[in-house]
Image (cartoon, grey):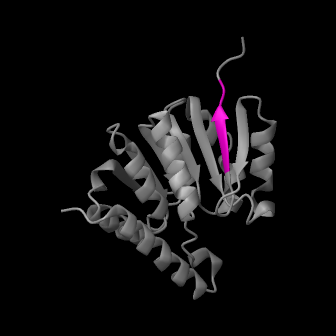
Amino acid sequence: MPENFDEVARALHDDGVRHDADQPDRRLRRRNLGPDAAALLSVVCRAMGARWVVEVGTSNGCSTLWLARAVHDQGGTVLSVDVDGEAQGAAAATLDRVGLRDRVQFRCADGGAVLRGLPDASQDVVLLDAERSLYPRWWPDPVRVLRVGGLLAVDNVLSHPDEVADVRDRIEADPQLESTVARTGAGLLLAVRRGPAG
């Protein structure tokens, strides 16, 4: 029988916070999406009826858990991408505990390469929560793969504004996108792909 989702999600987040506090190397920290931001993104995904979600940055599966829950009722799939296969294994085990493992496909690969390989307008939601310095190299694929009405989410826009400034400028200057920043957690930029004018 699946374990209680809220208890597992809370424990996973708390474990990530403890891990990061003791880890001096920023690249080895889990840097999870905060619980408020994860819950917000999950609710938005549900409201959209999202079925195809790409998450770049699995880490230990904190946001993966919430996204899998969001697509479950639609029979959807989360494609979760990370270069750390060991962390993805831990995330898969957590998803098993809450009965959501079948909603997620894990790919141990470079996020930019995966985005490049996805068809145009094929995704409902794209979440960028990985190594922020890489995001500009991935452009314009995070937008290209979104369907009209699809959502691009970028974490850490308030906690690390300098590191995401380039991408934030691109998003705000793109006439295809309408965006706002949710002042929850580390700051979650949400951008919707508009339909053609007229």
Q: Position of residue 68 (x, y in %)?
A: 39, 51
Quadrant in the picture for residue 172? top right
Which range of residues does the magenta coloring cover? 189-194
Main SS, magenta region, reads strand
In depth, the one of 128 and 42 nearer the eye is 42
The question of residue 30 being in magenta is answered with: no
Asked whether residue 86 appears in the rendered view, the answer is yes
Q: Image check: 160 left or right of 20? A: right
Which residue does the image show at 72% across and 43% down from the upper left? 180
In the depicted structure, whether residue 118 falls above or below residue 113: above
The answer to if 193 sits in the magenta stretch is yes
| Tally of numbered tags | 0
Residue 112: tell me if it is visible.
no
The residue under the point 63% across, 86% down is 24
What residue lies at 27% left-to-right and 62% top-to-bottom? Answer: 96
Percent position of residue 100, x then y: 30, 55
Q: Is residue 152 above or below residue 37?
A: above
Report the quarter where the N terminus lies: bottom left
**Quadrant of the rendered image containing residue 198:** top right
Q: Is residue 21 above or below residue 114?
A: below
Residue farthest left in this picture? 1
Query: What residue lies at 49% left-to-right and 49% top-to-bottom?
Result: 42
| Residue 17 point in image, percent of width and height | 55, 78
| Residue projecting furthest to the top | 198
